[in-house]
Amino acid sequence: MSARRTTATRRSLADQVRDLINDRGLTGYALAKSTGINRSVVNRFLAGGGLTLETLDAIAAALGLRLVESGRRISGARRRSTPEAEP
């Protein structure tokens, strides 16, 4: 497994999506326009705020990603799936 992949899996999904948005040079306005999500919601997310899974899924789709459940166990948690971005 590459070092980049190992590091990426330790970051939250939201942080990975924010990084991808920044890497692509997208603005909050452009992302809001392409997703139909209110610009204030997008800007709050880009500033570090949270989103509903539905909204995160819409942003991921606009970036050409698909959210899937990994089925990984989270330490200390009962059986629960964690979504991951998949290109």
Image: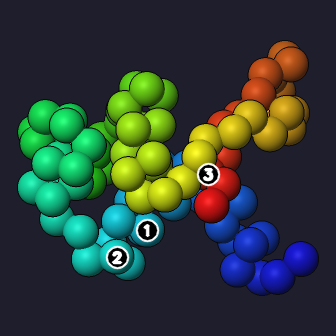
Type of amino acid at the residue the image marks with label 3 = Ala
Whether residue 75 is visible, yes or no, is no
Circle 2 residues within 10 Å: few <14, some 14–19, many ≥20: few
Kindly check if marks 1 and 3 are in contact, taking CB atoms under 8 A apart as contact.
yes
| Residue at image mark 2 | 24
The first of marks 1 and 3 along the sequence is 1
Residue reaching furthest bottom? 3
Type of amino acid at the residue the image marks with label 2 = Arg
Q: Position of residue 51 (x, y in %)?
A: 36, 32
Image quadrant in which the N terminus is located: bottom right
Kindly check if marks 2 and 1 are in contact, taking CB atoms under 8 A apart as contact.
yes
Whether residue 81 is visible, yes or no, is yes
Q: Position of residue 67 (x, y in %)?
A: 61, 41
Cα–Cα gap, marks 2 and 1: 6 Å
Kindly check if marks 2 and 3 are in contact, taking CB atoms under 8 A apart as contact.
no
Mark 1 lies on a secondary structure that is helix
Circle 3 residues within 10 Å: few <14, some 14–19, many ≥20: some
Q: Residue at x 79, y 22 (%)?
A: 80
Mark 2 lies on a secondary structure that is loop
Which of 86/50 is in front? 86
| Residue at image mark 1 | 20
Q: Quarter-wise, where is residue 70 in the image?
A: top right
| Left or right of residue 10: residue 73 | right
The first of marks 2 and 3 along the sequence is 2
Q: Position of residue 20 (x, y in %)?
A: 43, 68
| Left or right of residue 37: residue 8 | right
Image height of 19 relative to 32, above or below: below
| Residue at image mark 3 | 85
Q: Residue at x 82, y 82 (%)?
A: 2
Which of 36/46 is in front? 36
